[in-house]
Amino acid sequence: MARNKSTQLTDGEQSIMEVLWKNGEASVRDIATALSEEKPTAYTTVQTLCKILAEKGYADFRKEGKAFIYSPKITQKDARQSALTSMLNKFFGGSPKVLAQHLMQETDIDLDDLEALQRQIDQADD
């Protein structure tokens, strides 16, 4: 039985989207150059991942001469929300409370951060 294709971003796709969100649009070559600043990235790999991003609905493209120019079709905020909702449902039974408890128990969140979160909660209740 064939595995369902994930709609979530892989690490490589996420890196490309970061370039697109930062620049608004970019050619495959520009994306490969930007990614290669951190680690060598093949043009053909970027080309393949950009096609996948378009298929998943995260990016759109147009052709300019021989170059494909990609742009984000979804905002970074919307991508974060989708990833968070997926993670909540997959690991925490859809409960933000369970996630918050996990973060408090398993991370080095300090008292200042917790107090800032409490202030935001209090303001949201007003």
Image (cartoon, rainbow, N blue to C red):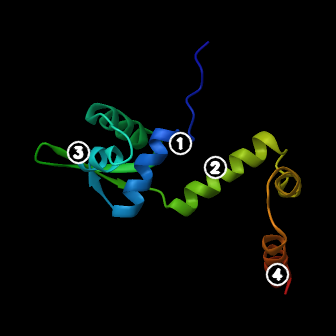
- Picture coordinates of residue 50 (x, y %)? 36, 41
**Residue contact at pointers 1 and 3, CB within 8 angstroms:** no
The residue singled out by tag 1 in the image is 9
Outermost residue on the left side: it is 65
Q: Amino acid at mark 2?
A: Ala
Q: Which comes sooner in the sequence, label 3 or label 4?
A: 3
**Residue at screen point 23% across, 45% down:** 29
**Residue at screen point 44% across, 47% down:** 15
Tell which tag, 2 or 4, sits nearer the viewer: 4
The residue singled out by tag 4 in the image is 119
Question: Viewer-proximal residue, 86 or 121?
Answer: 121
- Picture coordinates of residue 112 (x, y %)? 80, 75
Cα distance between the residues tagged 3 and 4: 45 Å
**Residue at screen point 28% across, 31% down:** 44
Q: In the drawing, does residue 75 fall left or right of residue 47?
A: right
Q: Which mark is residue 24?
A: none
Cα distance between the residues tagged 1 and 3: 21 Å
Tell which tag, 4 or 1, sits nearer the viewer: 4
Q: Amino acid at mark 1?
A: Leu
The residue singled out by tag 2 in the image is 83
Q: In the drawing, does residue 123 fall left or right of residue 67?
A: right
Vertical arrangement, residue 85 with respect to residue 49, above or below: below
Rendered-image quadrant of the C terminus: bottom right
- Picture coordinates of residue 17 (x, y %)? 43, 51
Q: Amino acid at mark 3?
A: Arg
Q: Which mark is residue 29?
A: 3
**Residue at screen point 57% across, 41% down:** 8
The image quadrant of residue 97 is bottom right
Q: Amino acid at mark 4?
A: Arg
Vertical arrangement, residue 34 with respect to residue 42, above or below: below
Cα distance between the residues tagged 4 and 1: 32 Å
